[in-house]
Amino acid sequence: MEKDDFLDDLHIGKIVEEIADHNRVSPKQIAEVICRYQNNAEKIFKLNDMNTEDVVKISYVLKYNLLKMLSEKYIPHLSGFELIPKQPYYILEVNTKSMQCKSNRYAGNYDFLNDDKIRIGTYIRNVAKEKGLNEQALGSLLSLSQSNISRLYHSKSITVKRMIRFSIKLEHNLFSELYLSRITIAPSQSMLDHCIIKISEARVDIMNPKNGVILKTFLPEKG
């Protein structure tokens, strides 16, 4: 695998540590969700690269979509699926007579990783097939031997940096359909505890009361 200098500054562990500190998530909580490093949770922050499925699980603990951030930073030129969650973040119940509303958290989790369809090897094989690439051609493109391509095709997941490199080589955002179209992470409830909900016939806006910035917009479903 050739070295990509643009990824030299990417250190997954440090990013996780920074967000964990900000969101007050302990290393132990992160270790528990990935079922590793329980006896030395701080080691997670020293990992330069991580498995994609671990990063998905950690994203739910942090309440921060790490793969979305990395995709936008390192492969913004590659189009992907529009990131519309299959489930809403929250259900807003509005009583228009009393002008009161309440919210119920309603978001998925990373159980979708158990789906047999979530296999990076199978997905890469399908992308290569769509582009007319056989094993030999794909190996040449990714700088991998044919035996390594065969192992790749049978892989459940790979590391984040490999996903970025392969996405660039294939000119296809591998994060998008496989993970990002399925991830639904509810923001902190505090976001809704301190907001302005503006209701009109056309939309419902959730706004920051301090500066009026719209945090989230809900559009009516089309009948």
Image (tube, grey):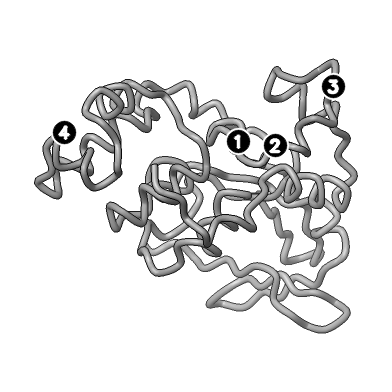
Residue type at tag 2: Leu
Q: In what element is the residue under mark 1? A: loop
Q: Choose the circle earlier in sequence order: 3 or 1.
A: 3
Horizontal arrangement in the rendering, residue 214 relative to residue 53 (left or right) = right
Judge whether 199 appears above or below 135 on screen. Answer: below
Which of pointers 3 and 2 lies earlier in the amino acid sequence?
3
Q: Report crowding for label 1: few under 14, some 14 to 19, many 20 or more residues within 10 A (C-alpha).
A: some
> Which image quarter is the C terminus in?
bottom left
Q: CA distance from mark 4 to mark 1?
A: 26 Å
Which of the pair 48/23 is nearer the observer?
48
- Measuring from the top left, give residue 98's x and y in whole percent: 81, 64
Q: How far across and how far down the image is residue 78, in percent?
A: 37, 63
Q: How far apart are labels 3 and 4 at the CA level?
A: 40 Å
Q: CA distance from mark 1 to mark 2?
A: 7 Å
| Rendered residue at 29%/36% (across/down) | 144
Find the distance from the CA under tag 3 to the CA under tag 2: 12 Å
Instruction: Give x and y (percent) for residue 139.
Output: 23, 38
Q: Nearer the viewer, residue 82 or 161?
A: 161
Real-space Cα separation, disc 3 to disc 1, in angstroms: 16 Å
Question: Front-most of 43 and 85?
Answer: 43
Residue beneath disc 4: 135
- Tell me, for residue 47, which label it has, or none: 2
Residue for badge 3: 40
Q: Residues within 10 Å of mark 2 (few under 14, many from 20)?
A: few
Name which residue lies at 79% across and 51% down: 19
Instruction: Tell me the distance, in whole angstroms, between the alpha carbons under discs 2 and 4.
Output: 31 Å
- Residue 116 on image: x %, y %: 37, 21
Are the residues tagged 1 and 2 within 8 Å (C-beta)? yes
Q: Which residue is mark 1?
A: 50
Element type at mark 2: loop
Quarter-wise, where is residue 145 in the image? top left
